[in-house]
Amino acid sequence: MDTRTLIKKKHETKRRILDAAATVFSNVGFAGARVDEIAKQARVNKATIYYHIGDKKALYREMLHDILGNAFDRSVRNLQGAQSPEEKLRIYVNSIARTMDQHPHLAPIMLWEQASGGENLPEVIAQVFANVIGTLTNILEEGASQGVFIKTIPFVVHSMVIGGAMFYKASYPVRSKYAAFPENVKKLGAGVLGDVSSEIEKLVLKAVKK
Amino acid sequence: MDTRTLIKKKHETKRRILDAAATVFSNVGFAGARVDEIAKQARVNKATIYYHIGDKKALYREMLHDILGNAFDRSVRNLQGAQSPEEKLRIYVNSIARTMDQHPHLAPIMLWEQASGGENLPEVIAQVFANVIGTLTNILEEGASQGVFIKTIPFVVHSMVIGGAMFYKASYPVRSKYAAFPENVKKLGAGVLGDVSSEIEKLVLKAVKK
DNA sequence: AGTTAAACTAACTGGTTGGTTAAACTATAT
DNA sequence: ATATAGTTTAACCAACCAGTTAGTTTAACT
């Protein structure tokens, strides 16, 4: 094994650890997660985690950074091409939906994080969130100043899009588990990209358009 | 102390336990909660919890039932008086906002519950949720058949209202903790009843109205 | 005053779990 | 070959924590 494959192996091990961490943490949250379980799923000795990353908290943070760090950041960069505020808003909603579907662990992890009051949220990630909100604020203000959008509280719109998508996605296990839910709800899937994001898009645009 | 005061005392103890449980569980979730901590906050010996209620899971379930059980149920009953679908939708949004504000533990607990995929959700509570969704579905379908609302996917509208309100409320600690968030976000409060619910109401009505 | 049942408590138990350590193994450089 | 640095492992430990037990207090009833 030469230096290159060694480095590759190192990265692969770390990747396996982070992937396993994402799976376990997203399923059971920080407090519910067992380091032994993560090690087992990563097919790695527990001490390897401590060697490569550090303690449970460091692992959680690194996993958060790994998942949330680039996801939204990259997604909202699609806006560059768009011209009109309407088009930008459409892309904004779509980007968020795509990001949610591309990263299945995203919604549950954001829920855990938010439920805990962002106890383990690294500042870098908070910055990413802030950027996403800032982007939407700009779109809505631009639209309002051009007279095509009504005046709104951008963060409420943001909450409805992100919160709505997150709620929709994360409610899937609950929806499908209990017989109590009506037929029209039970037949809905887990993904948001497609019909659901189109629906959100349609509703949001109709809501803010003058 | 006669029988009545004894029963009263028993109920008081149980109440203290359930209140403490709500606080602790809503702060740190099921896995993060320590029975010792709940006992401490309830000013009760740990064994008293086991005597009155049962194990940790039973305690969690009872707490959920105590908080979620009547909250939504009662709130959506306000719809009785309303005539038009518009009016009903308005009351629906408002009821949910009021319920969220009246029960500060509601949003975080729902987040924990949803993040866990409803692992501990009692069927009774799932039924309550199903009813709330059913109610909204009826409002939207009635409006559509009367030609005043456009055709929508009711559960997506529901997700945007509930998810939006929940996200708004639960994001408060995160919003206020990090300097990164823009000024227009940082100045927003935690409560949803008032400006925020009016905004949601306005947006939702504009979104679904023909 | 004596009896009984309910409510409560201090102390303990046994399994779990985050984290450590020292030894073994791998690949490269000399 | 041997040293060295990096990586992985099995075994271990101390702290923690859900749940139990055996015993005490409180108060209703006779």
Image: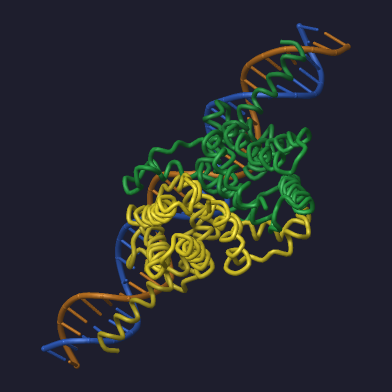
Chain colours: A green, B yellow, C orange, D blue
Relative to residue A69, is residue B17 drawn left or right?
left
- With A50 as the anchor, is B24 left or right in this view? left
Q: Quadrant of residue A3?
A: top right
In this image, A31 relative to D22: left or right?
A: right
Would residue B56 be visible to someone looking at this image? no
B94 versus A190 height, above or below: below
Residue A19 % position (x, y): 60, 31
Q: Judge by depth and name the residue closer to the eye, A127 or C11.
A: A127
Q: Residue at x 59, y 34 (%)?
A: A103
Nearer to us in this view, B167 or A201: A201
Farthest residue toward the front?
B147
Q: Does residue B208 appear in the picture of this structure? A: yes
Position in image of residue C11 (x %, y %): 42, 65
Task: Residue B164 in the image: state x and y as whole percent.
Answer: 57, 54
Q: Which residue is found at the position 68% from the left and 19% from the top?
A: A9
Q: Residue at x 79, y 53 (%)?
A: A145
Image quarter of the N terminus of chain A: top right
In front of the other: C9 or A67: A67
